[in-house]
Image (cartoon, rainbow, N blue to C red):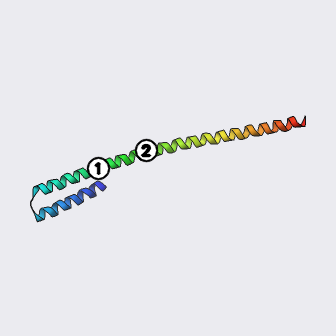
Amino acid sequence: MRKLTIAGIALATALTAGCATTDQGAIDEANATASSAGQTADKAMNTANSAASSARSAQNTADRALAAAKAAQKSADEANERAKRMLERASKK
């Protein structure tokens, strides 16, 4: 969408310039500028998509790490409870 907007602005500029003068060079330059802007927009979109993919991957990794930490905490809590009960039994003997 941005690419089309940029190209439209460049084309409108070229047409306006064409009305004022019939300088083909100015029109060609405007078209080249529009094309370059479109390529830049494409590269920016690819970069944004790549960043979004990396962010999703990082989020998945963080989710897995959090799940593992919660499981480890649960195991530690259970081990502490067992140890507490063992100490209580040992102190009663």
Q: Position of residue 47 (x, y in %)?
A: 36, 46
Q: Amino acid at mark 1?
A: Thr
Q: Residue at x 39, y 44 (%)?
A: 50
Tell me what residue is drawn at x 18 percent, y 54 percent.
Answer: 31
SS of the residue under disc 2: helix
Disc 2 marks a residue whose amino acid type is: Ser
Q: Residue at x 19, y 51 (%)?
A: 32
Please identify the quarter of the rendering in which residue 10 is found: bottom left
The residue where tag 1 is placed is 40
Instruction: Tell me: 19 left or right of 59.
Output: left
Q: Residue furthest bottom?
A: 20
Pick the quarter of the image with the N terminus: bottom left
Quadrant of the frame with the C terminus: top right
Please report contact status of discs 2 and 1: CB closer than 8 Å, yes or no: no
Q: Nearer the viewer, residue 56 or 87?
A: 87
Q: Position of residue 61 (x, y in %)?
A: 52, 41
Tell me which numbered mark, 2 or 1, is placed earlier along the sequence. Answer: 1
Task: Please tell me whether residue 50 is drawn above or below residue 30 in the rendered image.
Answer: above
In the image, residue 84 above or below residue 45: above
Q: How many marks?
A: 2
Give the secondary structure at mark 1.
helix
| Mark pair 2, 1: CA separation | 20 Å
Q: Is residue 1 visible?
A: no
Residue 52 appears at what percent x and percent y? 43, 47
| Residue 63 visible somewhere in the drawing | yes
The residue carrying mark 2 is: 53
